[in-house]
Image: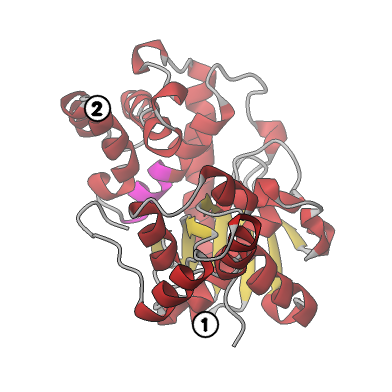
Amino acid sequence: MSDKEIPMLNSEFKEAWEKASCFGNSKCFEERAKLLADISRENAFALLFERELTAKEIQNNGLFCSVTEKVNSTKKPGRFVRPSDFEKIQLDGGGIEDLHTVENINPGLIGITVDYLTRLMTGDIAEKAFHISLMGADKVNAGAEAEALLKMVNGLDDNSICAAVRLAGFDSIYRAGESAYVPIEQIYPDNRTIENIINMVERSIEFFDSYGPKIADHLTFKGGYTGHVTNGDGDFLTKDTLWDFKVSKQRLSSKSVLQLLIYWRLGLHSIHPEYQRIKYLGVYNPRMNVIYRYSVDKISEKAIEELDYSIICYPRK
């Protein structure tokens, strides 16, 4: 929900909730749990706004999860599609062995920086590419400092890379709260780290030259979220492929696959028609310079049913 919206229960759900809440203690929570099993995002936030939910109900029913949180809480995430089932394509232009082995910046922050610089170098304006970083900076009253860093990001020169890494450091505030924030004064990428970032962004640009163009980034799924999966944003969309970027030293993981599967299902249930054209799910890793790709036609009906009704928790028709 946006900060200006006041969430409202729809009348049918409100009547059912009030009826369930009239039962005795154990029966009340049993009946309420049935209603929470496939609750919509709007009704979930309305109950939260009206202080109708207990902390125990939220935890026990798995409400208000991001896609990442849902993936991390799912047991045996590889049961839907195995990572080894993805087609693996090694691209020209070197691999992980051609990068420096030691970096002095957190891998997660490097990944964010490569992601945002790739968006910038493939058509985004700087304010859009780094918009989450800017929102994070606002939360700690560092908007002016972030804007100054943004103006320093002009390409793939060393100064731009340093400014981009420090600016991306504000991301953690928006995504995980102030406790996860590392003051940007402590963020100084060394020459090896800068060179690796430049190489990975250049590989990403070449990737889009071959597999693009991208038709959307900063992917969201309005209309597809539920009370169980209330937020999450994907990376890139090309004509027929939903892409996730992973700047990891590890091979494709079952959690990464599940994350991509959830994005796909959220997209198909969303208001955005472009997701209906997806034929493939893909992961591009610019550190390894490897593509992993899988046809959605190969995904079993059993996997789709479990994703829709047990993981994301859409109501059954």
**Image quadrant for the N terminus?**
bottom left
Taking the spot 27% from the left edge, 31% from the top edge, the residue there is 139
Q: Estimate the x, y position of residue 300 in percent, counting from the top left.
A: 78, 78
Helix, strand or loop for the magenta stretch, by majority = helix
Q: Where is 213 relative to 198, above or below?
A: below
Crowding around mark 1 (Cα neighbors within 10 Å: few <14, some 14 to 19, many 20+) is few
Label 2 SS: helix
Q: Label 2 neighbourhood size at 10 Å, few (<14), some (14-19), many (20+)?
A: some
Query: Is residue 137 found left or right of 243 in the rendered image?
Result: left
Is residue 119 a member of the stretch shown in magenta?
yes
Numbered badge on residue 149: 2
Nearest the eye: 90 or 309? 309
| Amino acid type assigned to the residue bearing label 1 in the image | Arg
Residue tagged by mark 1? 277
Task: Provide the secondary structure element on which disc 1 rests.
Answer: helix
Q: Residue at x 39, y 78 (%)?
A: 271
**How is the rendered protein coloured?**
secondary structure
User: Is residue 72 or residue 119 the one in the foreground?
Assistant: 72
Tell me the amino acid under the disc marked 2.
Answer: Leu
Q: Is residue 312 magenta?
A: no
Instruction: Answer with mark 2 or mark 1, whichever residue precedes in sequence.
Output: 2
Q: In which quadrant of the rendered view does residue 137 lie?
A: top left
Quarter holding residue 81: bottom right
Q: Position of residue 119 (x, y in %)?
A: 38, 50
Residue shown at 70% from the left, 35% from the top: 249
Write the start and end of the magenta stretch as one range.
116-123
Horizontally, residue 46 falls left or right of residue 92, namely: left
Q: Residue furthest front?
A: 24
